[in-house]
Amino acid sequence: MNWYRHSKEEVFEYLGTSVEKGLTDKEVEKRLEIYSANELQEEPKRGFVVKIIDQFSDFLVIILIFAALISIIIGEARDSIVILAVVILNAILGIYQEGKAEKALEALKRMSSPTAKVIRNGYIDVVPAANLVPGDAVILEAGDIIPADMRLVESSNLTIDEASLTGESVPVEKKCGAIIEEDVSLGDRENMAYMSTIVAYGRGKGIVTETGHNTEIGKIATQIQSLDEDLTPLQKKLNQLGKYLGIITIIVCVIVFGIGILQGRGILEMFMVAISLAVAAIPEGLPAIVTIVLALGMNKMVGRNAIVKKLLAVETLGSITVICSDKTGTLTQNEMTVVKIFTNNKVIDVTGVGYESSGKFKIGGKEIVVEEIQDLKTLLSIGVLANDANITNISGTVSILGNPTEGALLTLGKKGNIDKDKFNREYPRIQEMPFDSNRKMMTTFHQNYIAEKIVSFTKGAPDIVVNRCKYISINGEVLPLNDSLRKKVLDTNDYFAKDALRVLALAYKTYAKLPDEISTENTEQHMILVGLVGIIDPPRPEAKEAIVKCKEAGITPIMITGDYKETAFAISKELGIAESSDEAIMGEELDKISDMELRKIVEKTKVYSRVSPEHKVRIVSALKAKGEIVAMTGDGVNDSMALKKADIGISMGITGTDVAKNTAEVILTDDNFASIVSAVEEGRIIFRNIRKFVFFLLSCNIGEIIIVFTSILLNLPIPLLPIQLLWLNLVTDSFPALALGVEKGEEDIMKLKPRNPDTPIIDNSMMIDIIVQSIVIGATSLLAYIWGLNTFPGNLIKARTITFTTLILAELLRAYSSRSDKYILFEIGVFSNPTMVYGTTISFLLMLGVIYIPVLQSIFHTIPLEINDWGVISSFALLPLIIGELYKVIFNRKNKI
């Protein structure tokens, strides 16, 4: 039902309740059985078995398992055990990292509305919010979190902060008596209160109309669960790479098997050769190395205030081309702040004034003292005394209790060394006229501010307050508010309003004694105007810097908000997101256009205002349809559907709702937009490093294929056994590959445009590099093998040992060259990556163990090498490094991106 379209009496009748007595306990029990608990239904977590299946579903992993099974069938159990051990290790690492992320998320969860104050059986009671049912009468007070959707039936100066649901930064005034005849958006339903929003000011009562998944939040949560998750760019690229490698492996194995049979070799021998080729072709360490590098990146991001819930999301961050950001609390501080003052016939810019009490402001860089300017002191005093909000400071954390606009005035007073508690003691409030939407003013009466006088302080809408003022205070002197002065005040109001400031006028009036009749006609007339204040939810300073970096990195920032167009555009212009109002559009305009038309509009639009959750999803979908990799940031329930639809959802960890945190892939623990830039940079570094070790591993693997394949063509014995190839791929190559995975990023990495999402990990340029390096590695190792066969005739084990050692040394040396495809080794520094030094040293020592330790010799079919052997091996092993470095110089690698 559209509850906002029904009167209070109709709601009472339909739900069988009343605000005086509420429901009985017996009726509550009945309704709990019908409607179930007032809790959001969470999407079931992936079970352990599902996680395991996901880890084993990779195409490369499937081929490895198949190779292991073949090894068991032909009696090579040791090979199969090693292969399966790698596969299992990779799965364990993946599951472990996902588990860590889930635990971090659990630690961030907070109960949003644990209890509610209700009227049941005619008495007030406090019950768990989960036990609320439709028909319950709920009492609302300032600071309460709304525990369910409800139709308001009583309200007294009630305003509700709906930012988490609608994106509206200013609390919405509620009117219980309103009956709305037409369909309106959530933000305009002034007689309703919605689950998870917060009572900012006043008090009221409401009748629960919807609970759990039937609430507006619940509907959003249900829609979130129905959205399908797309594969990340890295998932797509790795899957594509795995399929290509798998197909190539199968083709090569079939060809070699056929050639061997034609040469008269035995079927069992050729099975061994086929397995050798399969093992050589597939970089067994690649899945584990990708997992480890992503996990290391995940841990780095935690240090930079970003929790990544899924490993593959780390890399996706580095490929984003668009960031769609919520405004309130993400790009802005979510703190209403006075930024301009008009008093003493001058405009004072107070932007940048700190919170700490100083008693000093600045005008155009010139410092002024509040005490020395009577009108400024009076204006600040009115803002502090005609005020029902409070500032709290708990363990160094300053927060506002009450209306955010009044909180802004308190903060302004604090900056001017005017303390509310002190002033309330010195100038006690003796009477008041609370704010209401008809008068659009609030007035309080105080003693002692002027000797032997009663003073009324008024704040409210400028057009109304100025119209009720007869005088104006300038330089401490009360002057008639003539047409010229009145025009200047109203022109200043317009000037403030054009900057999307919320403007309040402040005035006062003196009395010999408290008036007998307190009414707007009697007291809020013929007042003395003191000035105006302009208030806004200001942008985060760090967000402005982050947006500059985003643009430098080729990333388009977009603001999506439930706020009004003028306010949204003013903030976006100050942040540097938009330059012209033509780049802003309202949600109601989106309702009139098709999805195809929207795809054209998103190309130029930078600001979307007054949007609904459905609009956000449409915007993200349109951007993705244009080929963009989209990140969506937000903290409210209203952001959640778009968070899930986006390639990367980024939620705020402090102010973010549980629904948003559960939906997002990344959670910012400091709610700082600038942390996104750090995460993007880390993501870019990770992708570049993934390319580096993929290049390194594949050139090694293809080099191994060349050795084995060419040997078969030349009718030579198999140069490397499967167990030796496994050692090469899993141990020798893995340590340098890991070191490449932690290579520090290039200085200009955030000056480059985002890579094309369709670009594969192995592009044409890398393919040429791989082919060149593979041929060089394969040729030098094959020459070493032939040298061994000819130098030590009849000693096949020694020839294989020479080939095995040459290939390992060549790959270890070439790992240093793989650190950059632009700069030669001496330009980047041989020892500038300590991890590479440690990794290659460990791999070298392990190789010596395989060659010289008797137990390992029998396993890996090696024999000890002589000193003379090492001279020849070293000469062959240096060739790939030298040729690789010359290749960079010859082809001007510095111009390569």
Image: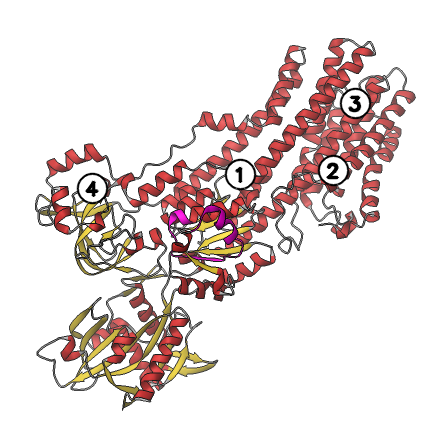
Q: Which residue is mark 3?
A: 708
Residue 75 visible, this orientation = yes
Q: How many neighbours does mark 2 have within 10 angstroms: few (below 14), some (14-19), or many (20 or more)? A: some
Foreground residue among 485 and 508: 485
Amino acid type, residue under disc 3 in the picture: Val
Mark linked to residue 132: 4
Residue at 75% across, 49% down = 822
Q: Quadrant of the N terminus?
A: top left
Question: Which secondary structure, mark 2?
Answer: helix
Mark linked to residue 767: 2
Q: Earlier in the sequence, mark 1 or mark 2?
A: 1
Q: Quadrant of residue 533?
A: bottom left
Amino acid type, residue under disc 2 in the picture: Met
Residue at 13% across, 86% down = 512
Amino acid type, residue under disc 1 in the picture: Leu
Left or right: 532 in relation to 34: right
Distance between the Cα atoms at labels 1 and 3?
36 Å
Looking at the image, residue 725 lies above or below residue 432 = above
Q: Position of residue 542 (x, y in %)?
A: 50, 61
Distance between the Cα atoms at labels 4 and 2?
63 Å
Q: Nearer the viewer, mark 4 or mark 3?
A: 4
Q: Earlier in the sequence, mark 1 or mark 3?
A: 1
Q: Which residues are magenta?
A: 593-615
